Amino acid sequence: MRPPTDGARGGSRTITSLQNERVKLIRSLHMRKARRDTGLFVAEGASLLMTARDAGWKPKILVHLAGSAANGVARDLVRWAEAADAECLEVSQAVLAKLAAKENPQTMLGVFEQVWKPLPPPDGVPADALWVGLEGARDPGNLGTIVRTVDAVGASGVVLIGPCVDPYSYEAVRATMGSIFNVPLVRAGPQDCLQWARRWPGDIVGAHLRTSADFRSVAYRWPILLLMGSEGPGLTAELSAACTRLVRIPMVGRTDSLNLAVATALMLYEVGRGRL
């Protein structure tokens, strides 16, 4: 399924009906199957749209509440979308309520094409590269927060290994706070990732509970591939065996594990400490 092509592109028009084909398309993007079939996703809010613009992305569709784009940032974003030949839709409050997230709905949203990158050739990665591999990440909020942290530390990108939550879901995109437009994303099966890792020129660092090596006491060898497993099971035995270093984040309280986004942030700031 692709965006309907029965209307003019590059202009603005008013939509008040929930039965409109564009409205149906955008609503369907709440579902993973529709995002997979169309290759599209939704980013909601002027802040995310400004980040997309500044990162060089171009929307396919821009939706704004009727009367909201008379001036200011909203007007500038509509002009940006029109210059990109996007379809600009001015919608009623009732239509926007069906398109926007249920909590704290925004007055603007954009529809974009998903971007997926290939695994970077190991012999071509820069000496200061820092990639994050997430195996079996399940929570969209965690994934979005990790993408945001990767952006904050200037890391190279995120590899989603095996079955993972969709980074282009509404919840994940929202949690990135716009970093979805700055951070390269890669999808890889476990075996493809293992073959890629075997040629990695620096350290492959795995966060693991069954090791005594404190993550703060290691001299890491760049470039770095940081592997993080899902909450609970952690890294599989196969990926753990591919690591050149297994480290742990010490804990002295009663819990034996950390939230995946928190653990990944701690690891990223520690391994990247020298350049931060």
Image (cartoon, rainbow, N blue to C red):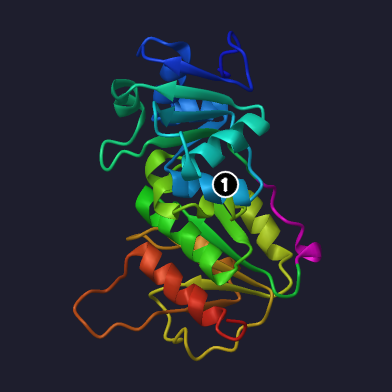
Image coordinates for residue 79, horizontal then vertical, percent: 59, 35
The image quadrant where one finds the C terminus is: bottom right
Does 106 appear above or below 94?
A: below
> Helix, strand, or loop for circle 1?
helix
Does 244 appear above or below 181?
A: below
Circle 1 is placed at which residue position? 52
Residue 120 inside the magenta-drawn segment: yes
Prevailing secondary structure class for the magenta stretch in the rendered image? loop
Side (left or right) of 44 relative to 115: left
Q: Residues within 10 Å of mark 1 (few under 14, many from 20)?
A: many
Side (left or right) of 182 relative to 174: right
Write the start and end of the magenta stretch as one range. 117-125
Quadrant of the image occupied by residue 158: bottom right
Image coordinates for residue 179, horizontal then vertical, percent: 52, 55
Side (left or right) of 253 relative to 35: left
Residue type for callout 1:
Ala
Does 270 appear above or below 234?
A: below
